[in-house]
Image (cartoon, grey):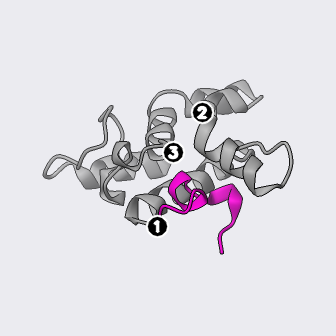
Amino acid sequence: MMTPDYASPEQVSRRGSYPASDIYSLAAVLFELLTGAKPHRFANSTLREIERAICEEEVVRPSSTVADRGECGKLKGDLDLILLTALAKDPRRRYAAIGGIHCGSGTPSRPAPGKGRARHADLSRR
């Protein structure tokens, strides 16, 4: 059983569930917490529509879903990039592990030695 709002493309299309699926689901929850909106919009609640929306439609930039300019500015840049990377349709394009999520990388990777904790602290203050 899955919750469609937080399910990854591979879960919805019955290709299995992997650690990258958990990264996707975490990002979907974080997207909602930061924007007040869910990353996917379903025209109806049929399985085909849910699969289409999650597997085919691109997730909009989180900062573009927020009406408040102040809040929008807080999401632009690193947080947009982090969420869009973690919500990539292809699991190979997502972060390999939660430790790969840190500001400023531009690509899924691991934090540089000695810098991971500082970067994670920066993210948690946002």
| Residue type indicated by callout 3 | Leu
Badge 2 marks a residue whose secondary structure is loop
Q: Residue at x 64, y 35 (%)?
A: 57
Q: CA distance from mark 2 to mark 1?
A: 20 Å
Q: Is residue 91 left or right of residue 59?
A: left
Mark toward the viewer: 2 or 3:
2
Q: Answer whether residue 16 is visible to the viewer in this image.
A: yes
Amino acid type at image mark 2: Glu
Residue bearing the label numbered 1: 17
Residue 18 among those drawn in magenta: no
Q: Which one is in front, 107 or 7?
A: 7
Quadrant including the N terminus: bottom right
- The secondary structure type at the circle numbered 1 is loop
Q: CA distance from mark 2 to mark 3?
A: 9 Å
Quick one: label 2 or label 1, which is nearer the N terminus?
A: 1
* Pointer 2 residue: 58
Q: Please provide percent x and percent y for residue 26.
A: 53, 59
Mark 2 crowdedness (10 Å alpha carbons): few <14, some 14-19, many ≥20: some
In percent of the image, x 59 and y 44: which residue is there? 55
Range of magenta residues: 1-15
Q: Quadrant of residue 43?
A: top right
Could you say whether the residue bearing mark 3 is in a helix, strand or loop?
Answer: loop
